[in-house]
Image: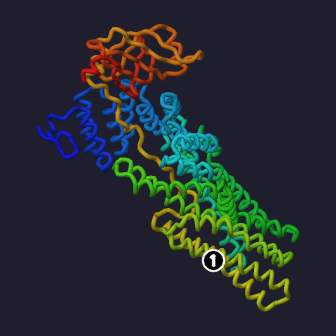
Amino acid sequence: MGTDASGRNDNISDRSSREWCDEALARLNAGRPESALDAARRAADLDPGAEWAYRLISLAHERLGRDADAAPAAERAVELARGSWPARLRLAAVLRRVPGRWREAVEHAVLAGKFAPEEPGPEVMRGDLALLRGEHTGAEQSYRTALAIDPGHPQARVNLGLALLRWDRPRPHHDPAWPIDPRDTGRARRALEVWSRQARLLVAAATLAIAGVALLLDWGPQAVLGGFAVLVLLAPLTVRQARRVGVWSYVPAMLRGDPWLGAALVSTAVSVVAFAAWLLLGAIPSVPSAFDPVWAGLAGIVVLGWPALAAVRALAEAWRGHPLLALAETVHARTNHARARAEIIHPRTNQALAQAERTARRNVGVLLWIVLARTWSVLVPLVGGALTVEPRAAVAAVVVPYPMVRGYLRARHRDDRWLPVATALVVLSATACAAGGLLGAWRIEPAAAWAWRAGLGAMAAAAVVFAVRASRAWWRGGPGPWRASLIMCDLPVGAEPSVALDPEVRQTFSYARGVVLSFGDSLGPRVAGAVASVTSSGELRVITETEAWDAVEADPRVAVFAADPLQRRFWVEVRGIAMADSDVLRVTPKQVLVGEFPGRHQRRQ
């Protein structure tokens, strides 16, 4: 039987369960989930009590997009090692995607944090669960706790930036805690969106057509009749989309979760009512001239309602959250990940860092566009107010781009060639408008006029560059300069190797006469005598006094000591998590320590 360069057994038939688990993990890191699934199944067949194998089976199914198959394997891993925090995290990661089991995912993430408070992973999972529900404050607290444990955690810092930005989850209309399948609410949302879009487009086009026919061809009465026909056409369209909703009981909650969807529906209803009122006023033969502004205003609501709502949404999204703080965190994450990748050789760690770095680079580009849009939205009213009231006030525009420029220089983002062009145009616009106001105050009118023209032209050009960049991203299906292009960093969890007990340790606990259980309660550290045995899955089963049972409910972290039953030359300490099971405590090992007692055998050696 031979071994490869790493010391691993190269004879497939002679590999142990743990060696197959190592092989499955290597295949997962190499991007071969189907092959990794086969290796993990071999490990589980060789040792049905190997919870690490079932975690890898679950992870392979998840990589293949089979969430329904990933859940049973993760649940089996928890059954085999109830005190394993990686198993709890693996199950939490799977259950958050299963409809109706969100609360269980939260419970398992909380237990994982209770089992391993020294690990950042459970806090990151709790932050992800909060972020996916839109609970940004709770997510921020969890990510900061994880970063206090591990400042270089690749996932916590990227997602902290999203929490600071008050990021909208991919399906804001759907609460992950609902028992309903997200595809059902997705179909309902799609039906409501289609109705809103079709109805608004139909009444807007009809308004323009009726006004054009009435003014150009003098066919006012016939055009009004055509408008009433459009209202009749809206009825079957509405009924058709209403049938597709299906889950009407969830619609109110969907609108609360996605207020922009509710705003679009209300805007559509207002447009339809305004269109009907506009037609009625047009159908009256002799309308007093005092109603002309009302008639024109109704037409404006119908035609301009959707563009106005789109502008309000763009402005609101640009001013939501703290993009500069989010940018600082994301840039920090990208820099740390790139530096760490250059220093780390382990492929699994390097792959996770590479994935986190790609996410951070994408989010940095989007955040810079958000900061640019916010800067532009400040310049427009400032310059407009200066032109209207006092041109000298435009001097203040020179300081507006400072945060944007500072963030851009710190980010050093070179992946988007449109971004430096738009940034330079915004800076030019602010500088030129400030110069125009200053030159006007000094009575240098020709130069002031040219400065104003340059500033306003650069401002318009920046908007054009943004529009071109957005259109190009939409056409190619790539990330655009908007919040919806931001993504979470979601690294795989639960692949950590389990702690194995070697035959010497197993023999010690199986035959030791004196076993001591150490635990903590309100009075401090305590010890108690115990009887222990080792299961085939590597857990300790401990029988001890009732005081220990009460203590482990509050703090399940324990340590079990035993001495060599034969020659009493060494001692064994197993630190782990104790969980009550029938009449015994099941202790899942987290760390194994072995040491020698001082004695004559050491002098002889």
Residue drawn at 60 percent across, 37 percent down = 249
Q: Residue at x 33, y 41 (%)?
A: 60
In the picture, which quadrant includes the C terminus? top left
Image height check: is 186 above or below 495? below
Above or below: residue 195 compared with residue 497? below
Q: Report the residue that reaches farthest toward the front.
A: 603
Bin the neighbour count of mark 1 within 10 Å (Cα to Cα): few under 14, some 14-19, many 20 and up. Answer: many
* For residue 215, side relative to residue 523 (left or right): right
Quadrant of the rendered image containing residue 206: bottom right
Report the front residue among 602 and 148.
Answer: 602
> In this view of the protein, can residue 228 be seen by the observer?
no
Q: Is residue 598 visible?
A: yes
Q: Which residue is denoted by mark 1 in the rendering? A: 425
Of residues 571 and 345, the one nearer the viewer is: 571
Looking at the rendering, which quadrant does residue 596 occupy? top left
Residue 441 falls left or right of residue 571: right
Q: Is residue 117 left or right of residue 274?
A: left
